[in-house]
Image (tube, rainbow, N blue to C red):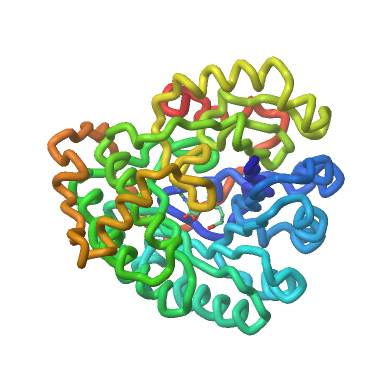
Amino acid sequence: MDVSVILTYRCNSRCSTCHVWQHPTLPAEEVTLAVLAKLPGGLDRLVLTGGEPTLRADLGEIVDCLRPKARQLEISTNGLQADKLEPIAAKHPDVRFRLSLDGLGARNDSIRGEKNGFERKMATLRRLVAAGARDLGFAATLQDENADQLLELYRLCSDFGGELAVAALHNGFLYHKIDNESANRVRLARAVQPLIAARLRSRRPRNWFRAHSELGLMRKILGQPRGRPCTAGRDCACVDPWGRVYACPIRPDLEIGDLAAQTWREILRGPRAAEARTRVARCTHNCWPAGTAGRPGRFPGLRPFAWIAAHRLRGVGGGPVDFDREVDFADVAQSPVVPRRESWLGKPFRPAFQRKSERPYGAFNNGMNR
Ligand SMILES: C[S@@+](CC[C@H](N)C(=O)[O-])C[C@H]1O[C@@H](n2cnc3c(N)ncnc32)[C@H](O)[C@@H]1O
């Protein structure tokens, strides 16, 4: 099972796609190490995220405690605080670091509201390499504002032997957002084509499988079913900064328990988890990635092997991907009309703390996110 732990909603980025930084948690109310220690062993993947996980003073201790519980532990970070990450990389070289990067130079800084963010991430990357980190990469959230730079982000990543993970833009309680939409779905989906072609040319098999799964990303962007059922609540779950457990980080109505008050086993075997799973089976959110859809590392079935062989082994009749055959670009969902997302870089804003005692996710617990 995969578990994401949202350690805090405090954040030192000011992303236009995610407004958690406007609604930080109080450090004194955030899930404690003792509660996190109740997570079971034998997990496939544990992702520490936020808000910004490096703002937790006890991040090092949390990693020490949770690393043995999962085959793979990932820190999803803005990479702005190398001092916090470097000792973790030195002590746990197998921890996976994914630095969020939404564009080159000023483009990243504008989307993510990060002063000199691009330069600071590159400096962090160099320090993590020097500290011995073995699994480094970038995570990009694909959107109208960075579609033209996707291939360059991939090349930047490949240049240092790292991985590029691409996520689609979502609404959801994790992001405290209900207005993330694409103005031009076809253009956005087409932007994935050169990335897929480049991945297929790479020598790393992981890239080939990502290439195949990103056909699903293209379909998802167009508004078509992404092709694999979501298994949230069964194969993955999410812990929020107050220790509440959800089937996924998108729908606040899929709360299944409270790790501070229950054991993990009680939560997953309880009636709320069972009810959430039936609702997940009917969910129309079509998230990317979600549940286990499209995630490299699980056996993906035989179809990707055949597809990869056809497009890698040109000598035996294969060739470049015919995207218009693979994806129906005429079947496009209409995006709701929303105001253009604004950059928060350098703009004044006073965040208001959200408390554990408030109704969870107030404004985000509505139709858009259910
Ligand atoms: C919410 S952040 C939290 C972790 C950390 N602060 C960071 O910047 O990576 C986790 C990932 O979600 C991505 N993200 C932000 N807004 C998003 C949205 N609306 N839809 C999908 N992914 C989003 C970020 O770019 C980042 O890669």
Q: Quadrant of residue 23?
A: top right
Above or below, 231 relative to 193: above
Above or below, 323 relative to 285: below
Residue at 73% in and 69% down: 92
Left or right of 191 in this view: 347: right
Question: Residue 173, how many percent across, how many down?
Answer: 53, 36
Residue closest to the eye, 231 or 222: 231
Query: Which residue occupies the extreme front position in the image?
Result: 316
Residue closest to the eye, 238 or 215: 215
Q: For the N terminus, which image quadrant?
A: top right
Question: Residue 337, how many percent across, how many down?
Answer: 24, 34
Q: Quadrant of residue 130?
A: bottom right
Residue closest to the eye, 132 or 87: 132
Query: Which residue occupies the extreme right position in the image?
Result: 34
Left or right of 153 in this view: 60: right
Left or right of 276 in this view: 342: left
Question: Residue 215, how many percent across, how many down?
Answer: 30, 47
Tally of numbered discs = 0
Residue at 48% in and 32% down: 230
Left or right of 325 in this view: 136: right
Residue closest to the eye, 47 or 175: 47
Q: Is residue 346 visible?
A: no
Q: Is residue 295 visible?
A: yes
Residue at 55% in and 69% down: 136
Residue at 20% in and 59% down: 318
Above or below, 170 relative to 160: above
Question: Residue 70, how many percent across, how many down?
Answer: 72, 51
Q: Quadrant of residue 102?
A: bottom left
